[in-house]
């Protein structure tokens, strides 16, 4: 009965979860064994925004996969690459790019 009431109050809850999961689905597999270490994350945190994409990829190496395009917190379009964490592969580091420029990162907890 309680589940039915929750469904009536928020009927799109499963649809929202499906859309969120789809946003973090790989559209192209790059390097299936790619993991990112704490040292690599530290280097990323020290990297200036707007740094060339090649600079970031130099120390992160090839990503696990490329995600579908997303948006930044400001609503700007962003290309996204995902790297599972070496110490917690269920958590992904998602690196954001605007064309050839690094514009930020996010984490995806699976």
Image: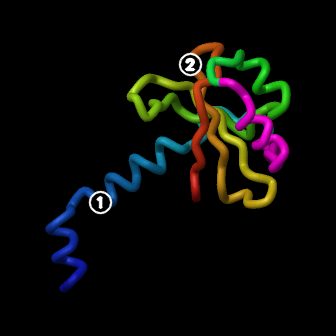
Residue 40 among those drawn in magenta = yes
Name the residue nearer the viewer: 7 or 49.
49
**Left or right placement of residue 98 versus residue 28 in this view:** left
- Left or right: residue 65 versus residue 43 is left
Q: Where is residue 101 drawn, in percent x and y?
A: 63, 17
Instruction: Give percent across and percent down for residue 92.
Output: 66, 49
Task: Count numbered badges in the picture.
Answer: 2
Q: Where is residue 57 shown, x and y percent of the image?
A: 78, 26
For the residues marked 1 and 2, what is the alpha-carbon distance in whole angstroms?
31 Å
Q: Quick one: quadrant of the N terminus?
A: bottom left
The residue indicated by pointer 1 is 13
**Nearer to us: label 1 or label 2:** 2
Residue that protrudes farthest toward the bottom in the picture: 1
Picture residue at 20% right of the left edge, 63% below the top: 10
Q: Residue at x 53, y 44 (%)?
A: 24
Mark 2 nearby-residue class (10 Å; few <14, some 14–19, many ≥20): some
Q: Is residue 109 above or below residue 71?
A: below
Specify the segment rendered in magenta: 32-48
The residue closer to the viewer here, 45 or 69, is 45
Going from N to C along the chain, the mark reached first, 1 or 2, is: 1
């Amino acid at each position: 009965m309680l589940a039915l009431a929750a469904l009536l109050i928020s009927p799109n809850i499963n649809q929202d979860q499906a859309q969120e999961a789809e946003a973090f689905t790989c559209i192209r597999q790059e390097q299936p064994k790619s993991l990112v270490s704490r040292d690599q994350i530290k280097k990323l945190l020290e990297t200036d925004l707007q740094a060339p994409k090649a600079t970031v990829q130099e120390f992160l190496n090839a990503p696990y996969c490329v995600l579908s395009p997303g948006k930044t917190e400001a609503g700007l379009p962003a290309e996204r690459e995902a790297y599972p964490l070496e110490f917690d592969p269920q958590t992904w580091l998602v690196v954001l790019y605007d064309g050839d420029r690094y514009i930020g990162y996010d984490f995806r907890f699976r």
